[in-house]
Image (cartoon, rainbow, N blue to C red):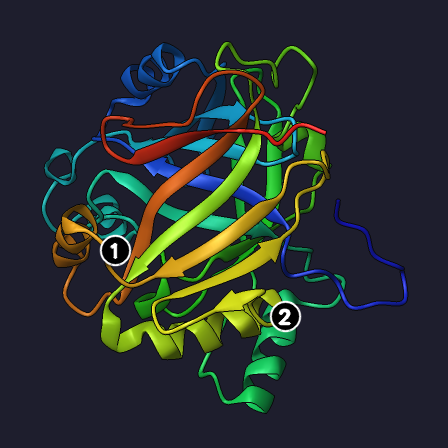
Amino acid sequence: MASESPTTEPSTRIVDHLVHLSPPGSVEQASQQFRDLGFTVIPGGTHAGGLTANALVLLADGAYLELISFIHPIEFYPPNSDERRERESHNWAKRAPGWIDWAFLGNTTYSTPISRISNDRASIDGSGVHYKRESNGGRTRPDGEVLRWVISQPRTTESGVLPFFCGDITPRPLRVPATDTNTSHKSTVRGVAHIHLVVRPASFESLTLQFTTVVGAPPKHVDASKAVWSVDTLAQPEIPTEVILTIPQNPQEHTFVESLDSGTASGVYEIAFGVLSGSERRLTTPYGRIAFVPLRSG
């Protein structure tokens, strides 16, 4: 479980949420696909700017899944219009459906900025990590409640590889209404077991150093092809959560790396969830890989 003293530096290793993109206008279809996989899905809302909408899967460990899609395809907006330019320049405009991004819990610009913490570490260890200054974000829930937060993103070339940070201005329970009902799932999912990223072999060493900068601790295991970090969640400390970085180990992972955009070193290959019952199994969403991993007993 994440905990920190008021006198310590804010944590940079608390899993906040995982972003799953589906085709434009398909939030409802994606929601049903996740329900069919045994997840409870609740409505999210429309983001500030009106380009995207989402639904949420809330987990007992305090993290959540954001099922997001653009409301309209790019072609919906008139050529040369401000709306068209905003849609084309969106950070996720050219991303293929699947696990496109992920976030650690941040804080607000009114306290110690996460971007400064990460960039100060990078200046010491020489990892090259750079986070942009915090910017405002928000969403309007279906009930009209307006949510506000700040985002700190890595530079564009690291987007979707290194996590971004999301820190609440309005109370986090408004963004993540994690009631017992909302966090109960037919699949018996309790929380995130691992976030697995597959990296181009030439970038493995540099990304291992960059993740060490972001997490603020060295990997608990590292060899020539795999690095593993222990990270935190806001609740359920009995569920161990890991970030796993590997070079391709099988034909599926080689295909995944080959499908990455030019210039992109890595991407989220699979999200694993700890479940209370059932055997270990892997499946797709259909746009991204997931795994169900039985929780250790005793």
The answer to whether residue 185 is above or below residue 259 is: above
Between 99 and 188, the one nearer to me in the picture:
188
| Residue at (13, 51) in percent of width and height | 255
Q: Quadrant of the N terminus?
A: top right
| Residue at (68, 62) in percent of width and height | 109
Q: Position of residue 224 (x, y in %)?
A: 36, 74
Left or right of 290? Residue 1 is right
Task: Quickly name the residue at label 1.
Answer: 89
The answer to whether residue 230 is above or below residue 47 is: below
Between 228 and 16, the one nearer to me in the picture:
228
Name which residue type carries label 1: Ser
Q: Earlier in the sequence, mark 2 or mark 1?
A: 1
Left or right of 89? Residue 290 is right
Between 171 and 176, the one nearer to me in the picture:
176
Q: Position of residue 206 (x, y in %)?
A: 38, 79
Q: Position of residue 128 (x, y in %)?
A: 44, 83
Name which residue type carries label 2: Ala
**Is any part of residue 18 visible from this angle?**
yes
The numbered disc on residue 217 is 2
**Mark 1 surroundings within 10 Å by alpha-carbon count, few (fewer than 14), some (14 through 19), many (20 or more):** few
The answer to whether residue 199 is above or below residue 295 is: below
Left or right of 32? Residue 165 is right
**Is any part of residue 132 visible from this angle?**
no
Describe the element under mark 2 as helix, strand or loop: loop
Describe the element under mark 1 as helix, strand or loop: helix
The image quarter containing residue 215 is bottom right
